[in-house]
Each structure stands twice: as C-alpha cells, then as structure tokens.
Amino acid sequence: MSDAKIRLYVEHPLGAGQSVPLSREHAHYLFGVMRQGVGAPVLLFNGQDGEWRAEVTEAGKRGGSLLCAHQTQPLHMPPDLWLLFAPIKKARTDFIVEKAAEMGARRIVPVQTDFTNAGRVHRDRLQAHAIEAAEQCGGTYVPEVTDMERLERVLAGLGDRQVMFCDEALVGGSPTLPNVAGPWAILIGPEGGFSEKERARLHGLDAAHAVPLGPRILRADTAAVAALTLWQQHLGDW
Ligand code: SAH
C-alpha cells in the first residue's frame, strides 16, 4: 500500500522523473479542498502508463506541479467488454456509467433504441463520471464514453464482437452464456424495453445471445450491473 491516499487521473505522460503540471481544477481540489501542499504524496494514472507515486513540487491557487517517483501499479486493462445501454433519466444514466467503469467495461456506448426516451446525452459529463469512478476504485484504465448512436448503427459496426443481449421477454429463465472468448458487448434496453422489430433483428444475429436475468424485471440500471457481474464472473477478469 502506498502512503498516498489521493488518486488523480491526468492527461499527461507518466514515468520516473516526469514532471506533471496540474490543471486549475486539480490544483483547487488538492490545495483548496484537500488542504495538501508541497511534498504531499499523490497517485497518478493516465490510462496508459499504470499508476505512479508522485509528490507535489509546486502548489498554487491556479496550478501547480507534481514529480513522478516510481510506478505503484502497471496498467491493468479490463477485458474487451463494451456496455451498450439505452440512456434513461439523468441520475440513473450517471449511475450506469459509474458502475460500468468500476465493474471493468472497456467502452461505454449510449444507444438510441426505438423506445429510448432520454434527451441529449452529455458525453463530457458522462466521461467525467467514468474518470471519477476510476479514481476512486483503484483502476488504472478509464473506459471511453462515446456519443450516443442508433442501435442499428452500433450493431452494424460490431465486427466479430459477441453480444449478451439482455432480453426482458425471457424473464423467468436462468442466464447462460456461451463460452466464446474474444470481444463482447452487453446490451441493455430502456425503461420501455426493446421493440419487436429490434428483438427480431437481434434474434437474427449470429453473434447475439439472448439472455434472461432471472425471475423479475429489473430496472435498466440494476440490469446493467447484474449483467456486468454475470459476464465478468463467467468470461472476464473476476
Ligand atoms: N418495460 C419492460 C422492461 C424494461 S427493463 C417490460 O416491462 O418488459 C430495462 C432493460 O433491462 C431491458 O430492456 C433489458 O435489457 C434489461 N432487463 C431487465 N430485466 C430483465 C430480465 N429479467 N431479463 C433480461 N433482461 C432484463
């Protein structure tokens, strides 16, 4: 365990002897909110170079800098698992993104389905939630949150990726996932579920595996966490 309690995601190369400038927001957080100063230890990661122990070398109101000493964790990439989900209400969508980052999704894709009933998706805000989740869960990788895309387009661009299609029409069954290695995606529908047209399209895809999630209909946010758990336990890094 490192003595450093604060972890920050930075968009800057990390390595021994590397100096890292602090953004205004990070300086405010470290020196204003957390009352840290020169010499304070901080753990840094950037999604590429693992985690590094650094120390504050300059502390100012609007900025500052850190100096990297040694690596405390190598980069640990999550499995090649994407979460495709239909955005719902703001707070629940934020929850889904936060949980997907903690659970080890590599990419998070908001999808527009026939019954998706959410306004504009603020990609930057969702990406910030993914970063915060990675900071607090000890991850060294931050999943990319993409712009919202139509389900049809997302399905057309999956290549050889398998899809765990969480189909509420199968409620009551027990989930079984085929033992297929390689890239996967989990698909979760909106509050209104999938349309018959979407269901037919998905059942017609060789790479899509329709899976029930037990005997009760789950809310989309619960379904996302349940599906990620199942997949990670069966085919992932748990
Ligand atoms: N309104 C729909 C439920 C939608 S639940 C209905 O009453 O039928 C939101 C999403 O969560 C679904 O589209 C599905 O992807 C997932 N989900 C919820 N419960 C599920 C279950 N028991 N089995 C499979 N998927 C489920």
Image (tube, grey):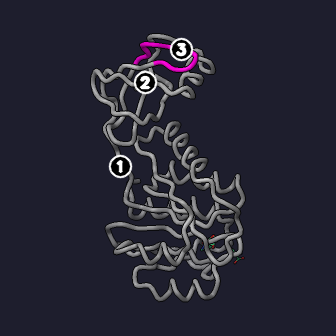
Residue 220 image-quadrant placement: bottom right
Q: CA distance from mark 3 to mark 1?
A: 34 Å
Q: CA distance from mark 1 to mark 2?
A: 25 Å
Q: Is residue 97 above or below residue 8?
A: below
Q: Amino acid at mark 2?
A: Pro
Residue 93: x and y in percent read 65, 56
Q: CA distance from mark 2 to mark 3?
A: 11 Å
Give the numbered dot on residue 60: 3
Which residue does the numbered mark 2 point to in the structure image?
Answer: 21
Mark 2 or mark 1, which is nearer the start of the sequence? 2
**Number of numbered discs overlaid on the protein picture:** 3
Q: Residue at x 52, y 74 (%)?
A: 175
Q: Considering the image in quadrants, where does the N terminus appear?
A: top left
Q: Amino acid at mark 1?
A: Met
Near mark 3 (Cα within 10 A), the count class, few <14, some 14-19 or many ≥20, is some
Q: Amino acid at mark 3?
A: Gly
Residue numbers of the magenta segment:
55-64
Q: Nearer the viewer, mark 3 or mark 1?
A: 3
Q: Is residue 52 above or below residue 136?
A: above
Residue 37: x and y in percent read 52, 12
SS for dot 2: strand
Q: Are marks 2 and 3 in contact (CB under 8 Å)?
A: no
**Residue 225 among those drawn in magenta:** no
Which residue does the numbered mark 1 point to in the structure image?
Answer: 77
Q: Nearer the viewer, mark 1 or mark 2?
A: 2
Residue 159 image-quadrant placement: bottom left
SS for dot 3: loop
Horizontal arrangement in the rendering, residue 150 relative to residue 104 (left or right): right
Horizontal arrangement in the rendering, residue 74 relative to residue 178 (left or right): left
Q: Is mark 3 within 8 Å of ligand 1?
A: no
SS for dot 1: loop
Residue 68: x and y in percent read 34, 22
